[in-house]
Structures are given as C-alpha cells and as structure tokens.
Amino acid sequence: MIDTVVWGTGNVGRAAIRAVVAHPGLRLSAVVVHNPEKVGRDAGELAGMDEVLGVVATDDATAVLAAGPRAVVYAASGDVRPDAALADVACALRAGAVVVTPAIYALYDPRSAPSEVRDPVIEAAEQGGSALFVSGIDPGWGNDILPLFVAGLGSTITQIRCQEIFDYSSYDQPDSVRYLVGMGQPMDYEPPMVAPTIPTMVWGGQVRLMARALGIELDEIRETLERRPLEHMVTNVMGDFEVGTQGALRFEVQGIVGGRPVIIIEHVTRISPTCATDWPMPPDGGDGAHRIIIEGQPRIEVTVEATDEGGNRAAGGNATAVGRLVNAIPFLRAAEPGLYDALDVPLLPPAGRF
C-alpha cells in the first residue's frame, strides 16, 4: 500500500480523498488543510462521505511531509498563488513523495514550460528520488489523451476541437465565478482568467502537447474571446446576478498552422442556460459536458457527461480529472525520478474496484 496525502479539501480535494480511499493500492495517511475551521475534522466528513475514515485534517504540512508519505495529491489552488503552489510541490518532492496535481499550469507540457518553473521541480525530484505528474482539472484528459485517442480512429484530420461547456449555476465558488471568470461583473470588467496571454499560459501547454503527439509544428498560438450580458436577472446559490452584467463567456486557445487553427481548446461558460443560447449547449440540456470534435474523414464527435456529488456535472468533471491523477500514483512510484506528462503516463484500468 502506498501511503498517500491529500493536500487541500476544496472541490478537487474532496474528490481526491474519495479516489484515494477507493484505490486498492493506496492508503490515505494524512489530509492537509489551510482553513482553521477544518483542522481536526475527519477526512470522510470533509469529503462528504458517509463514513469516518479515522484521518483527521491538519494544517502542519511540514510535519506531514516529515512522516515520509510516498505520494501527495496536491489539490490546493494555484490560480492566485502559483509561486506558493510551486514551492509546496517542490517540498513534497524533496521529501520523497511522488506528486500529482492540476495546480501548476505551465507543467501541463513540461517541455515548453519556462525554466524558472521546470528546473526547481526537476531538481527537487532528483533530490527526493521522486516524480511529478501535472494534468488539468478542466479536465486534462479532455485536452490530451482523449482527443488523441479519438483522432487515431480517423483516416484524415483537418482540425481537433476540445470543448468544455459549463453552466456555473450550481458551482458554489463565488470568488472564482464572480472575480476570476467575471460572471455578474460589468461588461467593461476584464476577467483575470481571460486577460490577454493568460489562456495561453494555462492551456497553451496542452495545445503544444497534442501538437507534439501528432507530429505538428505550430506556427503560433492565438486566443479568441466573446462575452455576453445577461438579459434577465439570475439568482442562484451565489446570490443575484444583475441584468447587463456578464452572463456568458466563450474563448479559444488555437494552435495555428499555415494561418489556420488546427488544434483548439474551447471553453463555453454561462451563469444561466438562458444566456447565449446560440452558443454550444450540452446535448441533454444539463449543466456541463466535454466534447471532442475531429474534423476530417470521417468526422467524429464524442461527448462525455460525468456526474458526482448528487448529480453535479462540475463535480463529475473534477472527479474524472482527479481519477486520472490518483490512478497514476502507482506508475509514478515505480518510475524513475523526474517530471512526467500526459503522454508519458498510461491510462490505467481501475483493477480491483468493481
């Protein structure tokens, strides 16, 4: 059994606790939290499980790493604290734990990552004899292994499009929804998530990784952005969203060859299904879906709809992304020290969990 720490208990961490507990080769050894109100609470309670796991949350990450865990699922946010997240991950690697995380966007494609991000974790992994795998929570498999697999079913390919279609109505994270994404803000507000160059910083690595797998040399990466205002006031778990404020956001990160977008990662997000109804929607009218569209011969379209935590699509997307990360731990534990990407880490079947 591989003693495994879950560091962070938000949307990603809750799913990570459940995934570690379900894995026959892993043992949940500790849970690290930042919020003082969570300290001392049982991991099962924090994960929304109907069982007591006997692992209580602590805010002493130093002591947890000193105990020598063999793996860490780093589920703390890197959105507004990228330097702190990088430092935390490096500490875990130096302590000898393999680490899986979605938090360090630049390492989705390590080969294109800036040296100031890549070099410290490589050095830390070598010092600790450990390994790191970073994959997206949007989810990563939807922007790397799944589109590549589906593309392998065709004869000719002219374009690959990866879509995340998401309705934030039930996503109770007001700071992220209102200020990072900009829902409910005036139309002259610039959401940090889509400020110029930020989408490329976050998702450009996945575009480059797919291009590398396909043997494509990209000329450049471009960004597009559309925003729509609300025509009716919307009220949900996060409060009121007023008429005229941002109600929908759509952007693309495009890998360009010969002036034409050939690899596209697209996000279509709303605060209500009544806004931007002409934009792509989930086929069943639900609150979220991930879609792969391969233009070529034949044209192939695959839609994935995952649910968790009582039927929530956002939680389902998080859970599948976490599953990819957690299931990679035994591979990384047996691998040589270093930095791994989605093309290195096999997609492993869930042996022993039926």
Image (cartoon, grey):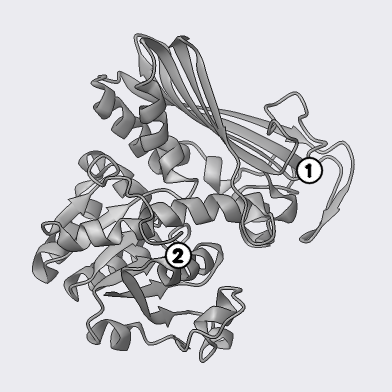
Q: Nearer the viewer, mark 2 or mark 1?
A: 2
Question: Quadrant location of residue 273?
Answer: top right
Q: Residue at x 48, y 79 (%)?
A: 34
Q: Residues within 10 Å of mark 2 (few under 14, many from 20)?
A: many
Q: Is residue 146 above or below residue 49?
A: above
In this rendered view, identify the residue nearer to me: 167 or 331. Answer: 331
State the image coordinates of residue 191 (x, y, percent, origin top left).
60, 45
170 left or right of 4? right
Q: Residue at x 44, y 9 (%)?
A: 296
State the image coordinates of residue 30 (x, y, percent, origin top left).
38, 82
**Label 2 sits on what residue type?**
Ala
All told, the count of numbered labels is 2
Q: Name the mark on residue 185.
A: none
Read off the residue under disc 1. 272
**Label 1 sits on what residue type?**
Ser
Read off the residue under disc 2. 19
340 left or right of 106? left
| Image quarter of the N terminus | bottom left
Instruction: For mark 1, give the secondary structure.
Output: loop
In this rendered view, identify the residue nearer to me: 131 or 21. Answer: 21
The Cα atoms of the two marked residues, 2 and 1, are separated by 30 Å
State the image coordinates of residue 56 (x, y, percent, origin top left).
47, 88
- Sequence-first tag of 2 and 1: 2
Q: Is residue 101 visible?
A: no
State the image coordinates of residue 349 (x, y, percent, origin top left).
36, 50
Instruction: For mark 2, give the secondary structure.
Output: helix
Question: Quadrant location of residue 52?
Answer: bottom right
Q: Residues within 10 Å of mark 1 (few under 14, many from 20)?
A: many
In this rendered view, identify the residue nearer to me: 85 or 58. Answer: 58
